[in-house]
Image: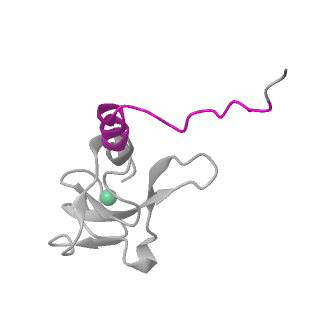
């Protein structure tokens, strides 16, 4: 006599500590979160658009929807992405690796 019972694969049964680790890794890749405005201060070097150093450049954290990679995207000078004096409030320092040698 054949059993009509089908094998039901157990749902995702990862131990809680694994889930916690995954969550931690996931959030680590999203720090800073998408939409964060970051600045890079050029303390020395060439003047940019006639503004001598120190001056700052702004970037926005964006995520590529195709590969989910986060990256700092340059904000154009004309859109407030560049200036002298104090860095704008609400902005955060970009990671050094995301900087660049652009004057
Ligand atoms: Zn510059």
**Residue 47 in picture, x, y percent from top left:** 29, 61
As drawn, is 26 to the left or to the right of 62? Answer: left
- Residue 42 within the magenta-colored segment of the rendering: no
Image point (21%, 60%), residue name: 53
- Residue 18 within the magenta-colored segment of the rendering: yes
Image point (39%, 44%), residue name: 26
Relative height, residue 79 to residue 18 (above, below): below
As drawn, is 9 to the left or to the right of 84? Answer: right
Which residue sits furthest right?
1
**Residue 3 in picture, x, y percent from top left:** 79, 26
Image point (25%, 50%), residue name: 45
As drawn, is 11 to the left or to the right of 85? Answer: right
For the C terminus, the quadrant is bottom left
Q: Is residue 100 visible?
A: no
Relative height, residue 94 to residue 34 (above, below): above
Q: Is residue 51 visible?
A: yes
Front-most of residues 63 and 26:
26
As drawn, is 101 to the left or to the right of 53? Answer: right
Front-most of residues 77 and 14:
14
Image point (46%, 50%), residue name: 70
User: What residue range appears in magenta?
Assistant: 4-25
Say which quarter of the image contains residue 8: top right
Which residue sits furthest front?
1
Which residue sits furthest top?
1
């Amino acid at each position: 006599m054949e059993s009509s019972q089908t094998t039901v694969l157990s749902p995702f049964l990862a131990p809680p500590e694994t889930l916690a680790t995954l969550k931690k890794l996931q959030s680590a890749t999203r720090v800073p979160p998408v939409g964060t405005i970051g600045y890079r201060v050029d303390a020395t070097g060439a003047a940019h658009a006639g503004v001598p150093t120190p001056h700052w450049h702004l970037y926005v954290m964006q995520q590529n929807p195709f590969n989910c990679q986060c990256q700092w995207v340059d904000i154009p000078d004309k859109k407030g992405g560049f200036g002298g004096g104090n860095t704008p409030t609400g902005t955060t320092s970009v990671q050094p690796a995301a900087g660049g040698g652009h004057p």
